Image (cartoon, rainbow, N blue to C red):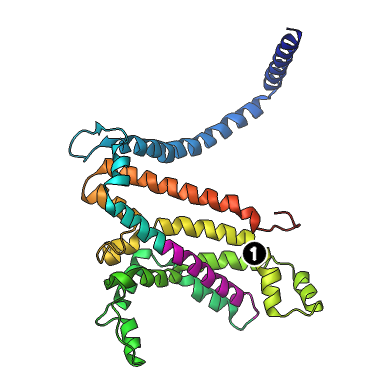
Amino acid sequence: MTHISSSTALAERSLDRSATAKSRLSKRQRRELYWGLGFVSLAVGGFVLLKIVPIVASFVISLTDWNVARAPSFIGFDNYARMLTADPLFWKSLWVTAYYSLFSVPVSMAFAFALAMLLNNKIPALGLFRTLFYLPSIIPIIASSILWLWMFNPDFGLFNAGLDLIGLPRQRFIYEESQVIPSLVFMSMWSVGPMMIIFLAGLQDVPNQLYEAVEIDGGNAWHKLWHVTIPMMTPTILFNLLISIVAALQTFVQAFIMTEGGPNNGSLFIVFYIYRKAFQEQQMGYASALAWALFLLICALSILVFRTSHRWVFYHGGDN
């Protein structure tokens, strides 16, 4: 009882001090506080209205059978059960998305890292090369997709024209189920500009004395790369890895503009499948359930990457 009474008295004294401190605020300080809270409330209100409310609404809709033309009816978790047990296209879209992500993420990261390594050297017209390599990433994705659609054309496309010149057989690229994902993975290398810039910033932060130490020990360029550059770049690699995974899992425009999910659902990415169910087939409840499945998948992969990062990410100072 004595302990409880003393705790209560301590809490009361803390509240009294807070009230006293608040009463000591000058008129100007209170005005600044109110203005600050007012400006913050706009950002918080926008976040709640444009982010939190739609997320909650999508989960509620995922528990209903709703086709927009009629009022939604509550069906519980039937949409989720249907997704897991009675929809082969869901598993197909999941496989296509995983297949694309498994190859596009490492290929794009390796290409961006190689470009950053190249542009980190002192070469003539360095600024021009940096601009040229970054330029494709600022072209709207729809315009890029139309451009690549022409280059992939099996009849008069640029790539088949090149194959003709060197005597190789023509390919169907995105018009063949077995080639569509490799073709889109190759296309993903087109927009690695932002990733390249991030890698370049990380490379410029690597201390030169570490390279000098390797040279003193008789190391070559490979030793510098493997024992200095890559370990010092692991925080940057972690960041780009997470961003790339999330972006790859949300691939949509390529399927929407170039393939319409074909051929034979060979490019049916899960986001495109969500779009098809929601806006073409008007199955809003089921599309919301699919969106939540994608959200949980992204969360699970992000947590997995973070949980395993302590094994391979090294920070300045030697602490993981």
Residue located beneath label 1 in the image: 233
The spot of residue 55 in percent (x, y) is 40, 39
Where are the magenta residues, as a range? 100-122
- Quadrant in the rendering for residue 312: bottom right
Residue at the location (34% across, 82% down)? 159
The residue under label 1 is which amino acid type?
Met
Q: Indicate yes or no whether the magenta region holds residue 148.
A: no
The spot of residue 32 in percent (x, y) is 61, 32
User: In this rendering, would 71 be left or right of 291?
Assistant: left
In terms of depth relative to the viewer, which is nearer, 52 or 219? 219
Outermost residue, right side = 216
- Quadrant in the rendering for residue 68: top left
Residue at the location (29% across, 84% down)? 170
In terms of depth relative to the viewer, which is nearer, 259 or 25? 259
Image height of 167 relative to 114, above or below: below
User: In this rendering, would 133 be left or right of 293?
Assistant: right
